């Protein structure tokens, strides 16, 4: 399990960095294993409901970070679904 979590976490980190580092609202991407955070330049609260409406469960960490905690058994299809939801919500306000 730890190897799978590390591999999927590395993959998710690469995807998030490629997709979201250039957005106006995103300050940085951070994470360890599958624990990921998208630190925003403003409060993260307004984005959580939008993400849930788009089918992605996320929470707020530290006020400005969208926290993602996917399970270690996440599939590539699940990752793509999560990235689509994030792209939709975070791109709307960039």
Image (cartoon, rainbow, N blue to C red):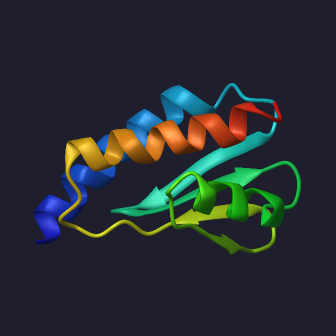
* Residue 23 percent location from the top left of the image: 73, 29
Left or right, residue 69 beside residue 38? left
Q: Is residue 3 above or below residue 77?
A: below
Q: Residue furthest front?
A: 53
The structure residue drawn at horizontal position 39% and vertical position 43%, both measured from the top left corner, is 81
Dividing the picture into quarters, in which one does residue 15 lie? top left
Quadrant, the N terminus: bottom left
Dividing the picture into quarters, in which one does residue 37 lie? bottom right
* Residue 20 percent location from the top left of the image: 61, 33
Q: Is residue 62 above or below residue 75?
A: below
Quadrant, the C terminus: top right
Q: Residue furthest right?
A: 42
Q: Nearer the viewer, residue 76 or 21?
A: 76
Q: Nearer the viewer, residue 52 or 83?
A: 52
Left or right, residue 71 beside residue 86? left
The structure residue drawn at horizontal position 69% and vertical position 63%, both measured from the top left corner, is 48
Q: Is residue 51 above or below residue 57?
A: above
Q: Is residue 55 above or below residue 26?
A: below
* Residue 89 percent location from the top left of the image: 68, 42
Q: Nearer the viewer, residue 80 or 37?
A: 80
Left or right, residue 81 beside residue 6? right
The structure residue drawn at horizontal position 80% and vertical position 67%, both measured from the top left corner, is 45
Q: How many marks?
A: 0
* Residue 71 percent location from the top left of the image: 29, 70
Q: Nearer the viewer, residue 11 or 47?
A: 47
Left or right, residue 10 beside residue 2? right
The structure residue drawn at horizontal position 44% and vertical position 48%, both measured from the top left corner, is 82
């Amino acid at each position: 399990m730890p190897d799978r979590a590390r591999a999927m976490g590395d993959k998710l980190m690469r995807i998030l960095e490629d997709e979201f580092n250039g957005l106006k609202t995103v300050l940085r991407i951070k994470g360890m294993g599958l624990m990921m955070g998208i630190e925003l330049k403003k409060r993260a609260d307004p984005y959580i409901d939008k993400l849930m409406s788009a089918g992605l469960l996320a929470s707020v960490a530290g006020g400005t970070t969208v926290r993602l905690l996917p399970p270690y058994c996440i599939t590539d299809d699940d990752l793509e679904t999560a990235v689509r939801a994030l792209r939709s919500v975070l791109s709307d306000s960039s």
